[in-house]
Image: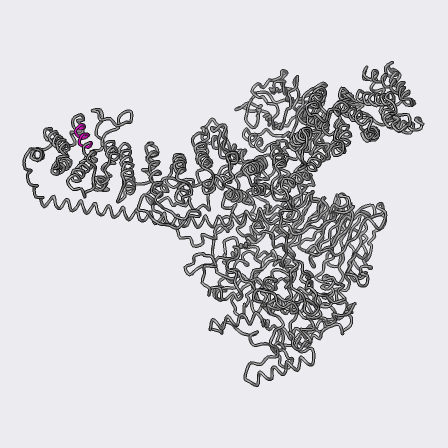
């Protein structure tokens, strides 16, 4: 039996051995044959003999004996291993394991038999291990010829049997590690699983043996069993966790292997399943802790998108609270620094051939590598080498201490690079640049982490060999012990400039691309960007010896730093092996491209969690976590997660800025300010660049976040006092403590207006009193660093000046209820003190004096009523000024300063002022302190008269108690100080030479106190007088005066003043008065200026706050069912989208709950992108230009004068909505009309964009105000109730998007205008008067003329005829031409009846934007009761020759009677009191569809009509309109012919219960022939509209509505006079308002278009085809034939798509290339890559690559129009791109001399518009339609997603996955959109689906159930037949066998009495024959009535019906 089992396998091996060569350890070929070698050793013979014995041994004991012999034999020599392999030893061992007698009756019945089986099993595994360990040949043979699947199959029975499972598991673990001391691990440890401590003790015995996993596949077999046992085997589970816990921490390789074999997913699933379970024992708690440890390490290694998504889902519970375990798991996992990398163990290497290169590049070379060493080798280990044949040219190695060593062929000895040392356990970037000859600098340059570490002057290696070069990473030398990783390695054919390695290093180890992106800076993290910026700033200021940063600046500016042709070799993980886990065994030399692996090499597919977060939802996810935090602990954890997700992931950082996430984060934190603790604060500011552990390293890294968060003083003022203080102190970290303070001040903070922000915070009274000193301290720090006029000096001086003045009441701040309170004065004094302290620094004073006149500022601050403290500060300033300039005293005197001081200071003189005056008087002492010594000279003599004046004031106060002056004690002190000064200071005595000074003293002596208690003062005063008089410095006259005053006795009378002295006094007084007036005026001007600035700042802050709140709501709200936290998403409701399809059809629905704030820039409400525009473009990209606060009002300063004239910007409120750089050119107040609603707003023309902003208007003076504050009469013109308080919705379009416009009448007033845009949207605006409308029309006409492009008209057929006319405007002549053109096309059947009626509606002024002038369509049927609708019978149709009111004799009689009666009484006669179209009729029909639901209520006065009067039955509605004598005469609306959703109550509105039937009113009741399906109804209704009968009789109906019978009495077609009324003729306001209401109800008759009877249609031939076309695909599908020859152009590969150029020529496109429509000279190119490989998107112009966008991972692409590209990526994201054109450089061969309107000579450029997330798997296909403004993407997750192109939003999903369908079979790989109907087709391997544009399912084709799978043709391509209207829809499906099937769909097979059941019906198979069946149909395209088929051979064939 055994022989028969093994013989076939042996024969196969014999054959394999004859042809297969296995590589031995040395890499040489060794042929293994089954024959016995002639020189076989005895050991080999013994091994072969033992194997032969084992084949036939059936007894277990015998097997044991043989296996023991084999165990000893295979260890003896390599030949024994070869003999074991040659003898089929591995197969025999698999046989032994699989045939152990586990199920035999006698087996396992006693301990002996059990032990024998266990021993036999262990020996078999042991022999396997010994045969594999260390033998590359045996391992290769086992993996290729035997396979791990065989081992798994042989082990399953052993693992599943309860007796052998533990041992078998131990054997597998031992085999995977090659250490059989672990064989009893599970047996031993399971016995102690209940006691965690005992388990730990026993585990320590086995822990040393748990080394590196050598055979990952074997461990995978063990893990598969262990994972299944996690939920069932409670005793095994803790042991498994202990093993995994040890392995995950023992080595990086083990962790990587565990991650690759899929340990994470089942582990995490089990962890989730046990979450929330109560842990009743220590063992369970210990088990839980182990699980957490393992999962944290595994997540740190990376996680798949699915695992990351599941982790996030579990983080938020159903009750909206955070799960702490999951939050901690996310937080720890985000610390991972592992990029995609290659792991190399021991002797291992990667080799790449260098093509035909047979010597080193003559220009030199560069080698770069990102390396990570787990441990250093015990002996030198090669990092890389370049060799040619047997000659090694260059080798770079690392020694045991981490030092690099270089060896080249030009030198014999090895060069030890002692300065170039690398560390373990960190990623290190190593660069070696080798120049061939370099005279000025050394030729060899070594860079570590971008910084040059070593330079050598070595000769360039020269190789003379005929062998091609080989580039090797790693070391093939046997017995190497290193363990290291490679993230990427490059070999370049040019030596890099010394600055470029620094830039490349900062790109980080995650960068794997080719340096071709022009925006390489976007790959930089915030920290890397800052580091480069600091380096450039430093290089520019350190002198000529520093490195030239020009190449670095060029790299930052241009991006492309390495020519693509210079990359000789690149090795990244994607180039080594596929990323499927362990897809290729690690030891087999594997080749992918030119890269081969040798030894133990594994590519580790790590996806860091931050990158997974970005793929799933980006920054919105972490922001939402922050918003959900409810405790301090939760908030700190959530903030940590958020910051860590941004720190090292440039994608998340870019996303954060794109969505204005930092503004949203600030808004969230403001709401949670009380939850911010010190941990949260430090986390945030460490993210911004501060270092609390090492303050000297603090550097601002993220200016975007810093300005938004750190400078939001209102936010931080709401936190606790400790946090407030810490926040204010952070300025000292950046500007004082940091060693990079100059960089922080000059580059990072210079334009942020921090001083103004701090002053505003002081003004707004946000901070409590105890925090004000800290605010002032922060102000001092910032001012000291940025002491410039505009940033600090003038704002601060203005603030002080305004707040030191009298208290003023100003508008409240955003949070405080009052402003400029009593505390404002105190705060201003503190700021003044801070400024004075700064002015003591000479450099600061110099800047201050240069910016402002110090003399005037000092007097300004002194004020009219100063306080002593202010006076002291002013005196201090005077002292500082005198010290800086000796002439200051004279300047101050010219400003009347001393006179003002003499007038004001004596009144407030106190001890503090007196001390300050003395300090000013005397020169400061050497030590800086005041000391009355002879060494101090007098520096300010001008202050002495002021001191004496204060002394006199004090003396007078002693005489008169009502006089204010110094106190008695102070007067005594003053006299004493003056006496001391006179006695001790000679310079003081010299001052009395001045007569004016002595006069002041004489005045003091003239007023001595008389009271006895002032005797001491009198004595001192006399003493002072005598001292002065007895001195030699006074004149004799004054001396005598003094002596007369001090001598005892009566005082002499005061001398009479002389006329000259009186005149001088008057002049002085007048001069003083004028000076005081000027100062007061200046102070008043400053105060007013500050008040206005503050007012505008408050308004701006409120507006910004409103926008930020809206942005936050947009980010945190909305969502869809595909969000990560779908349970947080509100239920979505739907409304009719205003976006229009062909013929202005509105069939698309949009979600109401979808927030508009995070939408596409063309429609926003405070668009996120615009708040981002308030910030700088990107912090990571601002490497040379500092950030600028464009939107912050606090930074405005013209820098010319102190009291600024605040510019009156009337449009200030709307500027934040403008695109960057846009300038407002015109503004008009309008009302945007939508249905019956009107939205007052502003229509703004910018230089580049057009804006419509709701809820804002201009007042009489042109200032923008809220609409709710405007006069009521302003909006009377708008008609219905205006939405004054609506959300400030903002829409924007670039001017080039304007396609046309048309003047409209609104309520019969010619004041409206409708603008048409290329994105399929329109804007109907009503102006205040016709003049405003005329100006706007002229402006639009000029814009369209400027931006119109030559060539055919846009593909917006029939949206409006005016679009195709000259300059977009329909003049009278052009209008007539358009009408005649449409009429001719209709008559020749070139357009359908539906399209023609739409054109007539539009040309007559009717538009779907205005419910009062809604497009009108006829009732075409009258049969609403038959089971089957007969469209061939005329009885089924309504009489189109008569109006609805005259279809029956009774109604005709009534109409004639009404007309006659009115005419007889002199009234304007009419036939009908109602109209065929009105806003009420429109809302009546559309009542079930928003927004018409609310409009109906508005017209009804706020509630529904009576239930029975609602639209509930189509047949009943027709009867009411055609037969009921009391009914209406309404016609239909377009939705009856294409929009089934309006017939369904999708929102489940409660309309009440019908009184007649008792049924609840829900959906509209359909005719029986509709079979209960609204889609079938509108389909048949449209067929009826296009029928022969309607085509024949439609001209008669047109005559009634638009033609010669519009007011024909004989035709009974005259309506109420108000339906023709001109509203402008009504002057009475009340009458006009009443008339408006009547018009809303009665309707408006459309403009008359025809004055003669309408001509008939050509009805000859097939009506479905134009007159000139005789054959069509639907009509002649069976006649289609294929051309015998293919298209001349044949591709080298499969045809991926078929395009047409501008001339209509068919152009096949290969995979990965696409051209924009009608632009064959431009191409977009991509390579299909995985997310890990990160692919690039390239833009080509005339075949030349002009742009490369890296790291986009594109897999598919489609153009929506010429300027919009949609791409799908392997990262699960759909991207929207905009194509713009820039002029080429003059040197370009493609540059054109034509005008700017020509595209020739303009380079195309792609810019990212939106990231669309929703899929959870790679995108496989994508398609887009500009006609419907949608895109659809198909993914491997089993779904297709519909996207809104205009808003950039998710709409709906179409699922193929579900039920029993496998994920592979449900992957959607094909999608298509029908441009005519909006239908979408999606195809997977399992089925083909057809849906409407709103994802309403129509039909499904099962591709697998109808026939055996092997016979099922795989669908490889699909395409719709396109026609403006076709009665028979066609979908073509190409198959893998080359055939094409034509399908249609219908509901004809619906069983009677059942709801319509649609199905696909095959019309025909287009079979090209046997030859074609060898290729697949890879591309299909209908061009007219021709089908083009592209196949996998590159050929394109045509199918068409013969003439």
Is residue 412 placed above or below 279 in the rendered structure? above
- At horizontal 60% and vertical 53% (from top left) the residue drawn is 1153
| Between 614 and 389, the one nearer to me in the picture | 614
State which region is magenta: 973-981
Residue 1056 on image: x %, y %: 7, 43
Quarter that holds the C terminus = bottom right
Q: Kindly give the residue lying farthest to the front in the view shown.
A: 280
- At horizontal 69% and vertical 62% (from top left) the residue drawn is 1563
Residue 1293 on image: x %, y %: 55, 54
Residue 40 on image: x %, y %: 87, 16
Quarter that holds the N terminus = top right
Is residue 1330 placed above or below 556 in the rendered structure? below
Give the quarter of the image for residue 823. Answer: top left
Q: Is residue 241 magenta?
A: no
Q: Kindly give the residue lying farthest to the bottom in the view shown.
A: 1464
| Between 148 and 1809, the one nearer to me in the picture | 148
Q: Is 1320 situated left or right of 1930 in this image? A: left
Residue 338 on image: x %, y %: 63, 31
Q: Is 3 situated left or right of 126 in this image? A: right
Q: Is 1564 situated left or right of 78 in this image? A: left
Is residue 1350 placed above or below 1597 in the rendered structure? above
Tell how many labels.
0
| Between 1829 and 124, the one nearer to me in the picture | 124
Magenta stretch, main secondary structure, is: helix
């Amino acid at each position: 039996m055994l022989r028969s089992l093994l013989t076939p396998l042996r024969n196969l091996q014999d054959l394999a051995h004859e042809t297969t060569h296995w590589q031995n350890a040395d890499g040489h070929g060794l042929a293994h044959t089954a024959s016995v070698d002639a020189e076989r050793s005895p050991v080999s013979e013994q091994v072969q003999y033992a194997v032969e014995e084992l084949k036939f041994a059936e007894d277990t004991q015998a097997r044991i004996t043989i296996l023991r012999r084999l165990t000893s034999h295979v260890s003896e020599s390599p030949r024994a291993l070869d003999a074991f392999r040659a003898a089929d030893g591995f197969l025999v061992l698999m046989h032994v394991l699989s045939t152990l007698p586990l199920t035999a009756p006698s087996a396992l019945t006693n301990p002996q038999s059990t032990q024998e089986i266990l021993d036999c099993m262990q020996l078999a595994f042991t022999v396997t291990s010994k045969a594999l360990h260390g033998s590359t040949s045996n391992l290769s043979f086992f993996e290729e010829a035997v396979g791990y699947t065989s081992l798994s199959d042989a082990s399953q029975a052993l693992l599943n049997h309860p007796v052998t499972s533990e041992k078998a598991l131990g054997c597998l673990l031992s085999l995977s590690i090659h250490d059989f001391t672990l064989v009893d691990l599970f047996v031993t440890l399971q016995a102690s699983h209940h006691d965690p401590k005992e388990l730990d003790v026993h585990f320590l015995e086995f822990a040393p043996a748990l080394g590196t996993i050598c055979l990952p596949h074997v461990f995978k077999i063990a893990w598969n069993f262990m994972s299944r046992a996690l939920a069932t085997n409670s005793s095994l589970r803790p042991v498994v966790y202990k093993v995994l816990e040890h392995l995950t921490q023992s080595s990086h390789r083990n962790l990587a292997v565990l991650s690759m074999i899929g340990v994470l997913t089942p582990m995490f699933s089990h962890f989730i399943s046990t979450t929330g379970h109560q842990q009743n024992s220590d063992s369970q708690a210990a088990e839980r802790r182990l699980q957490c440890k393992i999962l944290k390490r595994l997540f740190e290694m990376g996680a798949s998108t699915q695992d990351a998504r599941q982790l996030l889902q579990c983080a938020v519970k159903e009750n909206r609270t955070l799960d702490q375990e999951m939050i901690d798991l996310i937080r720890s996992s985000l610390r991972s620094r592992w990029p995609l990398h290659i792991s190399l163990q021991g002797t291992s290497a990667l080799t790449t051939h260098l093509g035909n290169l047979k010597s080193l590049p003559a220009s030199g070379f560069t080698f770069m590598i990102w390396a990570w060493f787990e441990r250093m080798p015990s002996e030198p280990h090669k990092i890389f080498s370049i060799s040619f044949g047997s000659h090694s040219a260059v080798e770079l190695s690392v020694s045991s201490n981490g030092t690099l060593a270089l060896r080249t062929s030009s030198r014999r000895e090895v060069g030890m690079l002692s300065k170039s040392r690398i560390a373990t356990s960190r990623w290190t970037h190593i660069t070696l640049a080798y120049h061939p000859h370099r005279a000025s600098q050394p030729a060899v340059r070594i860079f570590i982490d971008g910084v040059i570490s070593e330079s050598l002057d070595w000769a360039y290696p020269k190789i003379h060999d005929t062998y091609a070069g080989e580039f090797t990473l790693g070391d093939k030398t046997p017995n190497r012990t290193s363990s290291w990783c490679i993230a990427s390695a490059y070999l370049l054919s040019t030596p890099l400039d010394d600055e470029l390695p620094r830039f490349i290093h900062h790109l980080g180890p995650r960068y794997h691309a080719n340096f071709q992106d022009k925006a390489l800076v976007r790959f930089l993290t915030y920290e890397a960007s800052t580091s480069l910026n600091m380096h450039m700033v430093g290089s520019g200021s350190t002198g000529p010896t520093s490195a030239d940063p020009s190449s670095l600046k060029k790299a930052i500016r241009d991006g492309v730093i390495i020519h693509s042709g210079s990359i000789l070799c690149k090795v990244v993980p994607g180039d080594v092996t596929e990323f499927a886990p362990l897809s290729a065994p690690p030891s087999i030399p594997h080749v992918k491209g030119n890269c081969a692996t040798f030894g133990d090499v594994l590519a580790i597919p790590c996806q860091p969690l931050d990158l997974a977060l970005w793929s799933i939802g980006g920054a919105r996810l972490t922001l939402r976590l922050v918003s959900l935090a409810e405790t301090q602990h939760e908030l700190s954890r959530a903030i940590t997660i958020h910051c860590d997700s941004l720190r090292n992931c440039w994608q998340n950082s870019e996303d954060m800025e794109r969505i204005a996430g930092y503004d949203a984060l600030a808004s969230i934190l403001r709401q949670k300010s009380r939850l911010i603790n010190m941990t949260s604060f430090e986390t945030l500011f460490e993210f911004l660049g501060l270092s609390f552990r090492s303050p000297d390293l603090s550097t601002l890294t993220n200016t975007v976040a810093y300005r938004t968060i750190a400078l939001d003083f209102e936010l931080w003022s709401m936190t606790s006092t400790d946090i407030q203080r810490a926040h204010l102190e952070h300025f000292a970290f950046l500007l004082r403590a940091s060693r990079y303070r100059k960089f922080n001040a000059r580059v990072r903070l210079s334009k942020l207006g921090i001083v103004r922000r701090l002053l505003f915070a002081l003004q707004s009274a946000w901070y409590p009193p105890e925090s004000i000193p800290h605010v002032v301290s922060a102000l001092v720090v910032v001012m000291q660093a940025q002491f410039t006029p505009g940033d600090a000096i003038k704002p601060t001086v203005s603030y002080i000046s305004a707040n030191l003045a009298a208290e003023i009441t100003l508008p409240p701040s955003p949070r405080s209820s009052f402003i400029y309170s009593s505390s404002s004065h105190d705060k201003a004094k503190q700021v003044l003190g801070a400024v004075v302290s700064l002015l003591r620094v000479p450099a600061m004073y110099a800047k201050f004096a240069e910016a402002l006149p110090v003399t005037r500022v000092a007097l300004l601050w002194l004020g009219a009523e100063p306080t002593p403290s202010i006076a002291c500060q002013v005196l201090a300033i005077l002292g500082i000024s005198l010290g800086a300039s000796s002439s200051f005293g004279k300047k101050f005197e010219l400003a009347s300063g001393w006179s003002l001081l003499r007038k004001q200071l004596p009144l407030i003189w106190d001890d503090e002022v007196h001390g300050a005056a003395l300090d000013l008087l005397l020169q400061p002492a050497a030590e800086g302190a005041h000391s009355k010594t002879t060494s101090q000279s007098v520096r300010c003599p001008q202050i002495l008269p002021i001191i004496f004046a204060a002394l006199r004031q004090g003396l007078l106060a002693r005489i008169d108690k009502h006089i204010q002056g110094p106190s008695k004690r102070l007067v005594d002190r003053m006299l004493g100080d003056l006496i001391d000064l006179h006695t001790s200071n000679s310079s003081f005595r010299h001052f009395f030479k001045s007569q004016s000074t002595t006069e002041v003293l004489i005045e003091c002596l003239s007023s001595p106190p008389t009271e006895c208690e002032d005797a001491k003062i009198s004595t001192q005063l006399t003493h002072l007088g005598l001292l002065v008089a007895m001195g030699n410095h006074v004149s004799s006259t004054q001396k005598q005066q003094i002596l007369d005053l001090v001598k005892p006795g009566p005082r002499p009378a005061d001398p009479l003043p002389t006329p000259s002295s009186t005149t001088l006094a008057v002049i002085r007084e007048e001069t003083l008065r004028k000076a005081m007036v000027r100062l007061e005026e200046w102070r008043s001007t400053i105060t007013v200026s500050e008040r206005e600035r503050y007012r505008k700042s408050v308004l701006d802050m409120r507006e910004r706050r409103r926008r930020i709140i809206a942005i936050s709501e947009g980010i945190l709200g909305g969502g869809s069912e595909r969000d990560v936290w779908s349970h947080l998403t509100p239920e979505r409701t739907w409304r009719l989208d205003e976006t229009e399809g062909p013929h202005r059809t509105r069939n698309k629905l949009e979600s109401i709950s979808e927030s508009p704030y995070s939408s596409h820039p063309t429609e926003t409400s405070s668009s996120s992108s615009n708040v981002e525009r308030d910030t700088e473009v990107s912090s990571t990209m601002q490497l040379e230009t500092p950030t600028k606060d464009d939107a912050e009002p606090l930074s405005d300063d013209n820098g010319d004068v102190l009291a600024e004239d605040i510019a009156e910007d009337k449009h200030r409120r709307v500027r934040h909505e403008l695109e960057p750089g846009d300038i407002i050119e015109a503004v008009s107040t309008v009302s945007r009309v939508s249905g019956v609603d009107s939205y007052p707003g502003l229509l703004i023309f910018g230089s580049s964009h057009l804006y419509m902003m709701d809820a804002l208007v201009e007042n009489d003076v042109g200032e923008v105000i809220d609409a709710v504050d405007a006069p009521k009469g302003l909006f009377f013109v708008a008609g219905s109730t205006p939405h004054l308080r609506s959300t400030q919705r903002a829409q924007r379009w670039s001017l080039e998007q304007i396609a046309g416009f048309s003047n409209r009448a609104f309520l019969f007033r010619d004041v409206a205008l409708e603008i048409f845009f290329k994105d399929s949207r329109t804007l109907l605006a009503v102006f205040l008067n016709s003049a405003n409308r005329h100006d706007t029309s002229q402006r639009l006409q000029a814009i369209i003329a400027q931006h119109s492009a030559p060539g055919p008209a846009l593909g917006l057929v029939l949206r409006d005829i005016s679009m195709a006319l000259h300059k977009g405007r329909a003049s009278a002549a052009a209008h007539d031409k358009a009408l005649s053109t449409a009429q001719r096309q209709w008559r020749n059947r070139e357009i359908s009846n539906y399209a023609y009626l739409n054109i007539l509606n539009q040309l007559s002024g009717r538009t779907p934007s205005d419910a009062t002038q809604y497009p009108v369509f006829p009732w075409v049927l009258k049969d609403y009761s038959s089971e089957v609708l007969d469209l061939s019978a005329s009885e089924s149709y309504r009489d189109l020759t008569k109006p609805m009111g005259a279809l029956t004799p009774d109604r005709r009689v009534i109409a004639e009677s009404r007309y006659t009666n009115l005419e007889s009484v002199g009234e304007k006669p009419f036939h009908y009191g109602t109209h065929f179209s009105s806003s009420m009729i429109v809302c009546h029909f559309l009542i079930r569809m928003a927004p018409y639901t609310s409009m109906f209520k508005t017209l009804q006065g706020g509630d529904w009509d009576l239930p029975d009067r609602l639209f509930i039955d189509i047949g009943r509605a027709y009867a009411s309109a055609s037969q009921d004598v009391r009914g209406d005469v309404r016609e239909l609306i377009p939705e009856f012919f294409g929009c089934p959703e309006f017939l369904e109550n999708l929102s489940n509105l409660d309309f009440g219960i019908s009184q007649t039937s008792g049924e609840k009113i829900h959906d509209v009741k359909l005719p029986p022939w509709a079979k209960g399906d609204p889609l079938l109804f509108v389909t048949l209704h449209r067929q009826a509209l296009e029928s022969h009968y309607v085509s024949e009789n439609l001209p008669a109906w047109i005559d009634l509505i638009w033609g010669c019978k519009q007011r024909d009495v004989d035709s009974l077609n005259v309506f109420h006079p108000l339906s023709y009324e001109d509203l402008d003729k009504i002057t009475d306001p009340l009458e006009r308002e009443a008339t408006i209401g009547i018009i809303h109800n009665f309707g408006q008759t459309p403009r008359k278009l025809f004055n003669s009877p309408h001509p008939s249609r050509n009805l000859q031939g097939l009506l479905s085809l134009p007159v000139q076309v005789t054959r069509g695909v639907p009509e002649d599908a069976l006649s289609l034939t294929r051309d015998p020859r293919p298209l001349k152009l044949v591709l080298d590969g499969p045809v991926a798509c078929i395009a047409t150029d501008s001339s209509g020529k068919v152009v096949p496109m290969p995979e990965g290339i696409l051209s924009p429509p009608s632009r064959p000279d431009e191409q977009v190119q991509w390579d299909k890559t995985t997310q890990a490989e990160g692919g690039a998107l390239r833009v080509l112009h005339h075949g030349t690559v002009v742009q490369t966008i890296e790291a986009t991972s594109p897999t598919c692409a489609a153009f929506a129009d010429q300027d919009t590209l949609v791409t799908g990526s392997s990262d699960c994201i759909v991207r929207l791109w905009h194509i713009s054109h820039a002029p080429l450089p003059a040197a370009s061969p493609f540059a054109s001399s034509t005008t700017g309107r020509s595209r020739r000579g303009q380079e195309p450029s792609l810019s990212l518009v939106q990231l669309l997330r929703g899929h959870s798997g790679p995108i496989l296909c994508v398609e887009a339609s500009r006609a419907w403004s949608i895109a659809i993407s198909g993914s491997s997750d089993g779904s297709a997603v519909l996207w809104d192109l205009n808003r950039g939003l998710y709409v709906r999903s179409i699922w193929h996955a579900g039920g029993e369908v496998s994920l592979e079979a449900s992957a959607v790989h094909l999608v298509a959109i029908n441009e005519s109907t909006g239908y979408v087709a999606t195809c997977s391997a399992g089925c083909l689906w057809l849906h409407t544009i709103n994802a309403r399912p129509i039909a499904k084709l099962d591709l697998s159930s109808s026939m055996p799978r092997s016979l099922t043709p795989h669908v490889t391509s699909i395409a719709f037949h396109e026609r403006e209207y076709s009665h028979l829809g066609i979908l073509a499906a190409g198959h893998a066998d080359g055939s094409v099937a034509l399908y249609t769909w219908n509901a004809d097979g619906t069983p009677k009495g059942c709801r319509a059941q649609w199905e696909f019906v095959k019309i025909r198979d287009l079979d090209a024959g046997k030859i074609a069946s060898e290729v697949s149909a890879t591309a299909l395209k209908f061009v007219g009535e021709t089908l083009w088929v592209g196949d996998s051979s590159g050929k394109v064939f045509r199918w068409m019906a013969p003439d």
